[in-house]
Image (cartoon, rainbow, N blue to C red):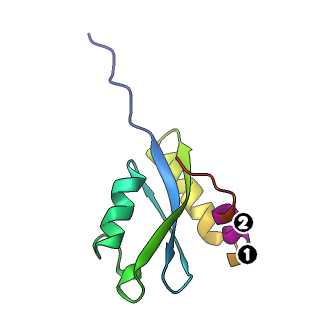
Amino acid sequence: MTPPAEAKPWFVYLVRAANGALYCGISNDPQRRFAMHQSGKGARFFLSSPAVALVYTEQCASKGEALRQERLIKKLKKSAKECLAGSGALI
């Protein structure tokens, strides 16, 4: 039996929209996902205000962990999300 392939890491990320709003999501490739958001695909959130910057990424051990972290971040007040965005934690 062959050992399982190493799982690709998952990330939780924040993207800044042109109107200043922050969007939180998860992906196993946040750079590619950000490019999708910029092109108008991937989330209805960006239909009213385009994605302008990937401002935060955090690596997680699994998709489940990324989903849990996303839920926690979405519950934060905007000021706390701005602190994350300002922390400069990018991959």
Residue at 35%, 70% in the rendered image: 37
Q: Position of residue 44 (x, y in %)?
A: 35, 80
Locate residue 50 relative to residue 18 in the image: left or right: left
Q: Which residue is disc 1 drawn over?
A: 79
Disc 1 residue crowd, few under 14, some 14–19, many 20+, Cα 10 Å: few
Name the mark on residue 18: none
Residue at 73%, 69% in the rendered image: 80
For the N terminus, the quadrant is top left
Q: Is residue 7 above or below residue 14?
A: above
Q: Are marks 1 and 2 in contact (CB under 8 Å)?
A: yes
Element on which disc 2 rests: helix
Element on which disc 1 rests: helix
Q: Nearer the viewer, residue 35 or 61?
A: 35
Locate residue 87 relative to residue 49 in the image: left or right: right
Q: Position of residue 42 (x, y in %)?
A: 31, 69
Residue at 38%, 26% in the rendered image: 6
**Amino acid at circle 1:** Ser
Q: Which residue is disc 2 drawn over?
A: 83
**Amino acid at circle 2:** Cys
Q: Position of residue 36 (x, y in %)?
A: 30, 66
Magenta range is 80-85
Q: Is residue 23 above or below residue 6?
A: below
Q: Position of residue 79 (x, y in %)?
A: 73, 75
21 inside magenta stretch:
no
